[in-house]
Structures are given as C-alpha cells and as structure tokens.
Amino acid sequence: MNLKSPIVNNFNSQNDNLRDLELLKSFLAGDNTSFGKLYSFYEKKVMFYCKHLTENDLVAQDVFQEIWIKIINLRTKSIKVECFKALLFTIARNTTLNHIRGEKRYSTKLIYNYDVNLKATNSEYSETEELVNKALARLPFIQREAFLMHAILGYSFEEISKVQGVGLSAVKSRSARTRDFIRKLLSNWMALSEEVLD
C-alpha cells in the first residue's frame, strides 16, 4: 500500500465544515445532489482509511459501502451534527472496528492481504514505504489509525480526538509513540540490510 496520499491538502477546516453542514442539511431534506457532493469530497479519504486499517482491499470495499449506507440512513433519524467530517470518520471507525471484531470471531488469526503487485504497478512506491507499511501493520489499530489520519490524511489532533473519543493528549502521545516505533524499526531494518550487503 502506498503511503503517499494525493488527498492531503491545506484547507480551512471551518469553511469546509460550514460547506459540509449545508450539504448535509440539504441531503437530509431530500437533495440527493448534496449527498453526491459530500461523497465526492470524502470518498478517497474514507477509502484510503478503510484500506489501511483493514489491510484487505475486498474488506475495505465492503466497509466503505457500509459507511456510506449509514450516512444515507441518517435521513431517517433526527440528528444534530456539529462537524460532518467527525461524524463520517466516527462512523468509519466504528464500522471498521466492528468488521475487524467480526473477522476475529470467525478466525483465530486475522489474515492481512498485502497487494504484492503494488510495487510493480506503482513507480512511486519505494522500499522505504514498504517498510513503513510493514511497521504500521505491527501497530495496534488505535495507533495505526491516529498515525494514518494525521500523517497521511492531514487531520488535526483535535479532529482525531473527536473521532477516537479520547483526549487530545492521548492522541498526541499515540502519534509520538507511533513515530518513535516506526523510526526505530526502520533504523533496525536499514542496519540489518547494510549488514547483509557487506
């Protein structure tokens, strides 16, 4: 899986939130075009999130569809939303976790499906990115999620804390531990590969 995400951009979160809330309000009132706009704004980010946390393209597609079905089903509920992005990624997180838990019930070991052809089909994919992906796979879900949302998808620590339902300091601590873990693992792997080459 490629960690280089074309999705990260600098944006004014407050303006985006106002836009999203207006689109959500229109969608809940029956405007399907507004749903299409919300979907187009977030489809790549949600799919990226699903793929990297489930580490299985087929499972990610199932989870992705389930997330958007839950968004569509909001029409039948009376809800108050302060931030659509936080709502969307809370739904994405809960749906992904439920799916992973369900998989573990039926299997003693969750099998990860790495795309072995990715390196051949993506010229930007590097050995370092492959090592980072392997390091991420070793992390607990909660740490991997925080890292992906911040470092790859560009979410603020405040937004991640809302999605994960934890304090800001917990998210920052998890992110720092993840960076340290990846840094140590990469340096160990690099040292090992230098020994093999010598």
Image (tube, grey):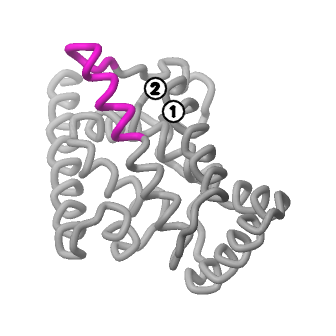
| Residue count near mark 1 (Cα–Cα under 10 Å), binned few <14, some 14–19, many ≥20 | many
The residue shown at (66%, 51%) is 72
What is the secondary structure assignment of the residue under circle 2? loop
Magenta span: helix, strand or loop, mainly? helix
Q: Position of residue 165 (x, y in %)?
A: 28, 65
Q: Residue 131 lies in magenta, yes or no?
A: no
Specify the quadrant of the image occupied by residue 6.
Answer: bottom right
Does residue 98 appear left or right of residue 181 in this picture? Answer: right
Above or below, 54 relative to 94: above
Q: Residue 97 lies in magenta, yes or no?
A: yes
Residue type, mark 1 in image: Ala
Specify the quadrant of the image occupied by residue 122.
Answer: top right
The residue shown at (54%, 69%) is 79
Residue type, mark 2 in image: Asn
The residue shown at (62%, 44%) is 69
| Residue count near mark 2 (Cα–Cα under 10 Å), binned few <14, some 14–19, many ≥20 | some
Instruction: Give the camera-side residue of 39 and 178.
Output: 39
Q: Are marks 1 and 2 in contact (CB under 8 Å)?
A: yes
The residue shown at (20%, 34%) is 189
Instruction: Give the camera-side residue of 81 and 13.
Output: 81
Q: Residue furthest top?
A: 107
Instruction: Give the camera-side residue of 183 and 134.
Output: 134
Above or below, 83 relative to 2: below
Segment tinted magenta in the rendering? 96-111
Above or below, 86 relative to 63: below
Specify the quadrant of the image occupied by residue 149.
Answer: bottom left
Q: Position of residue 76 (x, y in %)?
A: 64, 56
Cα distance between the residues tagged 1 and 2? 6 Å
Marking on residue 60: 1
Residue annotated with mark 2: 56
